[in-house]
Image: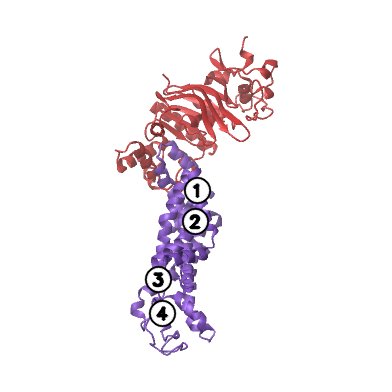
Amino acid sequence: MPLLDIQSLVVEYRTLRANVKAVDQVSLSVEKGETLGLVGESGCGKSTLGLSTVRLVPFPGKIVSGHVTLGGIDVISCADEEIRRIRGKRVGYIFQDPMTSLNPVKRIGAHFVEMVRTHEREVSKEDALKRGREMLERLGIHPQRIDDFPHQFSGGMRQRVMIGLALALNPDLLIADEPTTSLDVIVEAQIIELLKHLKESLRLALVLITHNIGIVAETADRVAVMYAGKIAELSETDTLFERPRHPYTQALLNSVPNVRKKGQILSWIPGAPPDLAEPPPGCLFHPRCPFAFDRCKKEEPMLMKHNSSEVACHLYDKR
Amino acid sequence: MSNDATRKGIFIPFLRPITSLARRGLAGSAILVGAMMVVALALMTMISPWISPHDPIGINVGPILSPPSTQFPLGTNHLGQDMLSRVYSGGAIMFQVAILSVIICLAVGVPIGLFASYVGGYTDRLASLVMDSIYAFPGLVLAIAIAAMLGPGVVNIALSIAVVYVPSYFRIIRSQVLTIKELPYVEAAHMMGAKRLSILFSYILPNVVPSIVTVATLNFADAILTAAGLTFVGLGLPVSTPDWGWDLTYGRQLLTSGAWWVIAFPGLMIVLLAMGFTLLGEGLSELFNPRLQK
């Protein structure tokens, strides 16, 4: 049984104009120790998908249907107290902006104490601090700095502190929602290196949400490409990069510079993602797709197995 | 980074020694000057029994309406009371009223503001409705009405001032909580499974405290003026209490006969005290507000 199992999940944002489906019929699973990359452009629903795994979709959003099981617990229907015990304890979460993700009036040590004692009441304050120091040391921060305030750390260090907090209780699953977006490339490389190292040494399952396809290539075992709330393609990382099947994935890869390809001309994807309040009929990608044919405008493609990948595209549907 | 500035702004007043305040430009000196004024007046009031040359409520200790002289440096009033002694001791009630009203405000306004705005929805609407309707009244008129209902006395004056001032606390706290509860670190706290109460008390409250301090200092200044105003219209304290407010009430009538000293010195004390608190509050709010910092 997979650690995280998502079955035909639908999450809607209820706005005055329309009910917008930010996540539409998404099915995914993550095994223990596996790294799943979740890629897509802004607004494709990847963060919403991440948040719904711990039932924290922000206000106008609502989980409409589907199932999410986390280590055997039904996340959607369990009691509030039960889901609260999962958050932080079984699932660690890292946010995009480390600059504002720490409480500015509390020392780093207090964050660790809060984190540990929320879930393990019997642990003393000293033991929690000790755990915090060990964790900091492991992440390359001097343990004495546990007495400092968040504003005394740089962005990269704060993100490492966030990672340390997320891992303080040895969760089975770590969800990193664009963990390096607000950091510069050098620090980004350090953080990614750190995540790779940690997931191997802790046998941690990792869901890496990002719009940076390069990071995914480096870290993920499998990749899910999302477009307009749906999964366009889901396959092993190597397969995805060698033989991208969905036209959107192909376009996405062509828009990333590759040092190995000489004289490559970068392309871009014409048009913009669809307005999900009034989605186009048929395949949501057809207005921007160079291979679109009649059927794409009428019928919505389903995610189907094609060789080793799963693709939602009529091009690969033999019928 | 503006974020860094925010954080420094929160910590400096608590962590740095007072001496470095002066180096922080206008805001720092405002805090120092304001604090000195308030402390000096408080000290003067506290030691007044030992430094007053005469009994502040004793009648005919000197000639009636004598102008400032060497024997009576601040003159005497129409009852022959020594103005210097009355100025020394007349602040006691004002300080009590101001401190008590701020305590009541903190005890009532802060929890309501925190809970209602954190819970949101109908609770928040209801609390806002009640608070806004109190806020819509002119402060002094409402205080006069309440004081008239409750009768004179320190506690009653403090209560009537508190009723007027609670909505200010509520509004400030509400606007802060509404902002803070959407910030990533609160979201992160939810994500690590923190309980709602612990989020409210260890994540939101500490970040609202600077604003509460600022409102409280302004509340002090306003409480003093309102207390003086209540005494002035005769709803304050028994006549036998030495009080700057009473001196103003009588001094007003005596001013026409040229006895300026009866009203001038107690009036000056009220102005100084209110100014001290205002400077303190303004300075603090400037230190706390990153946008006003250089």
Can you give x and y, in whole percent of width and height, for residue A42 in the image?
59, 32
Mark 1 chain: B
Name the kind of residue labelled 4 in the image. Answer: Arg
Q: Which residue is mark 4?
A: B86
Q: CA distance from mark 1 to mark 4?
A: 46 Å
Secondary element at tag 2: helix
Same chain assignment for discs 3 and 4: yes
Chain that is coloured red in the picture: A
Q: Which mark is residue B126?
A: 1
Name the kind of residue labelled 1 in the image. Answer: Leu
Q: Which residue is mark 2?
A: B167
Q: Are marks 1 and 4 in contact (CB under 8 Å)?
A: no
Ranked by sequence position, the earlier of labels 2 and 3 is 3
Residue lying furthest front: B149
Q: CA distance from mark 1 to mark 2?
A: 13 Å
For label 1, the crowd category at 10 Å Cα-Cα, with few meaning under 14, some 14 to 19 and many 20 or more, is few
